[in-house]
Image: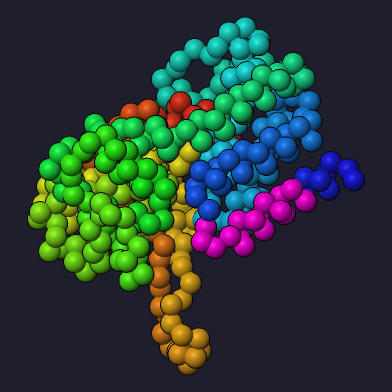
């Protein structure tokens, strides 16, 4: 079996794994799966130069994302690994790249020539080590975010959260605060009646229609991001926009848990990437009768504007929405973004 066939089989297996998992795997699991897939592709294709590697990464990530439009993490991981390879080349060929203003987003001629002529054999081991470090950072992101709960949640706080049952990061965030001795109340907004009975002991579950009546007694709102963008906007589970609007009306801070691998380097203009829909909840017979007459939309996410977010809680610190654009320089290279 040649390398091209192996790579096609790996990509096909990756897509099948994403599609047949219900409920969906956690975002960190998908990010690690993507890192492992790209690592296998790189070392099977064996690109000769940095240019070959960048072209290969861009092509594979575009095809994978085209198959699963809602998984923005695929693009993020591909561009992160491209930056890791670029950094390794520049370190081997005479030190790191000087820090320019972000408006100077094109590489100079000397840097471009270094990247074009770089031999990938010399940086293969270093790139493999960098990819392994990226995997470790993804695995530890949940614990890093959870450790910041003691800086944001205090005694006697009344915290309103959303999607606690489906977010392991949110659960770890609240559990760490409880184990650290924080004595506060947690109000969890649930989507289904079954979640009312399965809520943790430290949580008071309510439904979405009760949010307006319970918001005046709330002191903080915590949401989890499905993706966030350089302009400070983000995608949150459906219902989050209504919650954030009510919080703004009552001057209540809104914290959004946002691991670094969910940071998209550019705003996605493709509607299929931003507007994912859940399955229709109507019975089959009723749905068949209404076909062509009624369109029941069940969106999975809401888009939150930057003015509705107080802080993004990332791996290393809390970031105001206007500084998200600066954060992306730590994980992406501007030339890769422009070329993509």
Quadrant of residue 212 in the image? bottom left
Out of 106 and 88, give the one closest to the viewer. 88
Residue under the point 77% across and 45% down:
7
Is residue 99 placed above or below 70 in the rendered structure? Answer: above
Residue under the point 50% across and 50% down:
26
Q: Position of residue 10 (x, y in %)?
A: 74, 48
Number of numbered tags placed on the structure image: 0
Q: Is residue 41 magenta?
A: no
Tell which residue pokes out farthest to the right in this image. 1
Quadrant of residue 68 in the image? bottom right
Can the viewer see residue 23 in this picture? yes
Taking the image as shown, residue 202 lies to the left or right of residue 22, namely left
Q: Position of residue 316 (x, y in %)?
A: 37, 28
Q: Which residues are magenta?
A: 9-24
Out of 315 and 302, give the one closest to the viewer. 315
Q: Position of residue 292 (x, y in %)?
A: 48, 87
Q: Position of residue 235 (x, y in %)?
A: 38, 51
Tell which residue pokes out farthest to the top in this image. 94
Can the viewer see residue 306 in this picture? no
Q: Is residue 19 magenta?
A: yes
Q: Quadrant of the N terminus?
A: top right
Quadrant of residue 12 in the image? bottom right
Residue under the point 46% across and 62% down:
276
Q: Quadrant of the C terminus?
A: top right
Q: How is the image coloured?
A: rainbow
Is residue 101 placed above or below 310 in the rendered structure? Answer: above
Taking the image as shown, residue 98 lies to the left or right of residue 87, namely left
Residue under the point 14% across and 51% down:
218
Taking the image as shown, residue 137 lies to the left or right of residue 112, namely left
Name the dominant secondary structure of the magenta segment.
helix
């Amino acid at each position: 079996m040649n390398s091209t066939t192996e790579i096609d089989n790996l990509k096909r297996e990756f897509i099948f794994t994403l599609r047949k998992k219900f409920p969906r795997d956690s975002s960190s699991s998908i990010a690690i799966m993507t890192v492992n897939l790209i690592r296998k592709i790189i070392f099977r294709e064996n690109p000769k130069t940095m240019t070959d590697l960048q072209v290969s990464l861009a092509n594979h990530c575009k095809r994978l994302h085209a198959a699963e439009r809602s998984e923005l993490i695929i693009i993020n991981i591909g561009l992160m690994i491209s930056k890791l390879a670029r950094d390794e080349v520049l370190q081997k060929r005479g030190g790191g790249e000087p820090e320019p203003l972000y408006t100077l987003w094109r590489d100079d001629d000397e840097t471009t020539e270094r990247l074009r002529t770089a031999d990938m054999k010399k940086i293969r081991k270093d790139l493999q080590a960098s990819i392994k470090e990226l995997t470790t950072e993804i695995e530890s992101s949940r614990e890093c975010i959870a450790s910041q709960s003691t800086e944001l949640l205090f005694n006697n706080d009344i915290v309103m959260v959303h999607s606690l049952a489906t977010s392991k990061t949110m659960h770890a965030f609240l559990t760490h605060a409880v184990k650290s001795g924080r004595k506060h109340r947690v109000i969890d907004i649930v989507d289904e009646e079954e979640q009312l009975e399965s809520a943790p002991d430290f949580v008071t579950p309510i439904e979405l229609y009760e949010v307006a009546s319970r918001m005046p007694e709330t002191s903080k709102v915590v949401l989890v991001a499905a993706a966030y963008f350089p302009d400070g906007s983000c995608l949150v589970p459906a219902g989050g926009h209504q919650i954030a609007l009510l919080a703004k009306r009552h001057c209540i801070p809104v914290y959004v848990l946002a691991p670094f691998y969910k940071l998209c380097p550019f705003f996605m203009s493709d509607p299929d990437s931003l507007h994912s829909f859940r399955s229709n909840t109507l019975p089959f017979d009723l749905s068949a009768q209404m076909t062509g007459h009624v369109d029941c939309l069940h969106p999975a996410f809401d888009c939150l504007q930057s003015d509705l977010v107080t802080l993004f809680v990332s791996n290393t610190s809390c970031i105001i929405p206007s500084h998200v654009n600066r954060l992306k320089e730590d994980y992406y290279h501007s030339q890769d973004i422009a070329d993509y």
